[in-house]
Image (spheres, rainbow, N blue to C red):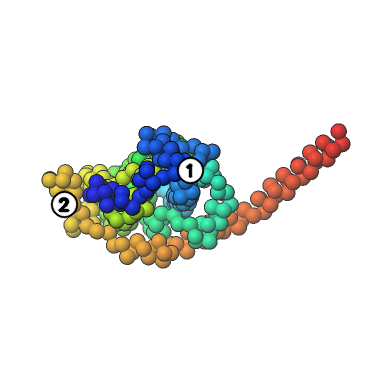
Amino acid sequence: MYAQMVKTDAARIKGLDEMDPQERVFQQRIDTGQKIEPKEWMPEAYRKTLIRQISQHAHSEIVGQLPEGNWITRAPTLERKAILLAKVQDEAGHGLYLYCAAETLGISRDQMYEQLHSGKAKYSSIFNYPTLSWADIGAIGWLVDGAAIMNQVPLQRCSYGPYARAMVRICKEESFHQRQGFDILAKMVRGTPAQKEMVQDALDRWWWPSLMMFGPSDDASVHSAQSMAWKIKQNSNDELRQKFVDQTVPQAEYLGLTVPDPDLKWNEEKGGYDFGEPDWSEFFEVIAGNGPCNAERLGARRKAWGDGTWFRDGLTAHAEKVAARRAKSVAAE
Ligand SMILES: [Fe+2]
Ligand SMILES: [Fe+2]
């Protein structure tokens, strides 16, 4: 499937011989595995693609704190609370590294926030689902951070230096996140029947949205093929989804859970699972802003931005006063 995709789309992507000399050197550097750094020449479309992808990624980290933050005050033990706090703080850190990486491409933090708050920029659709029980916190760590790792590990080899380097630390932290989620569930399935039922219910609700995190099948996408040629993207959405299913199903079995997919079946020939198609109409509805929590999530981000206005104004006023004092003392010398 992957080879076919590259072949189909290759015809629509510029060949080296069609490029001007500057672009050819750029592409050859990428082809030989060199990293592109902020001050270096890059095609405008490469810059724009990266700004969109990195800022979307940053927004997802920040908005992703909300469904889990919802459970910090209700974590069942002090230890679970401390772990969840650390996890949610990590996500804030991921957002900050990624905003910094995007800023190196010439967009400001304020512009990115503006795009998020106006609804122009997207973030991962998964964070528009509610967290109804403590088991959801386990399911998010296990499945959502698990899917994020699948997506992010190849990004460590992305052609853009600052993005690739940010991913190294992020991936290390994501693997802790996934384990903490799995650990919550492993404990709960050994608990009372009601607790085990909560875990199954969480899996039933989070399974399909997690598979949607890889995006629709990208067999026919020129966009994806171009990102692959630029080594911004290294695997197709379907490839990553398959890897995720193959990794996760045995873990579900270990927990004694049933994956809510009647079409799920081991396929000896391909050495992986066959599985059903997610409901893409639901995915596009959520992306379009009509998921269960879109309004709540954006509302929380806009409120946080509004609540911080006095502080930003204060910092600006202070900076202006300091600059004016400095200018005055220089003039007096
Ligand atoms: Fe993260
Ligand atoms: Fe995470």
Q: Earlier in the sequence, mark 2 or mark 1?
A: 1
Residue position marked by numbered label 2 in the rendering: 265
Of residues 257 and 312, the one nearer the viewer is 312
> Left or right of 252: which side holds 289?
right
Distance from the alpha carbon under mark 2 to that under mark 1: 45 Å
Mark 2 or 1: the one toward you = 1
Quadrant containing the C terminus in the rendered view:
top right
- Which amino acid lies under the numbered mark 1 shown in the image of this protein? Met
Query: Going 45% across and 47% down the picture, which residue do you hit?
Result: 46
Residue 123 percent coordinates (x, y): 44, 55
> Left or right of 274: which side holds 244?
right
- SS of the residue at dot 1? loop
> Left or right of 127: which side holds 322?
right
Furthest residue toward left: 269
Query: Going 38% across and 34% down the picture, which residue do you hit?
Result: 33
- Which amino acid lies under the numbered mark 2 shown in the image of this protein? Lys
Taking 3 as reference, is 286 above or below it? below
Of residues 226 and 64, the one nearer the viewer is 226
Residue position marked by numbered label 1 in the rendering: 42
Residue 95 percent coordinates (x, y): 49, 46
Residue 182 percent coordinates (x, y): 32, 44
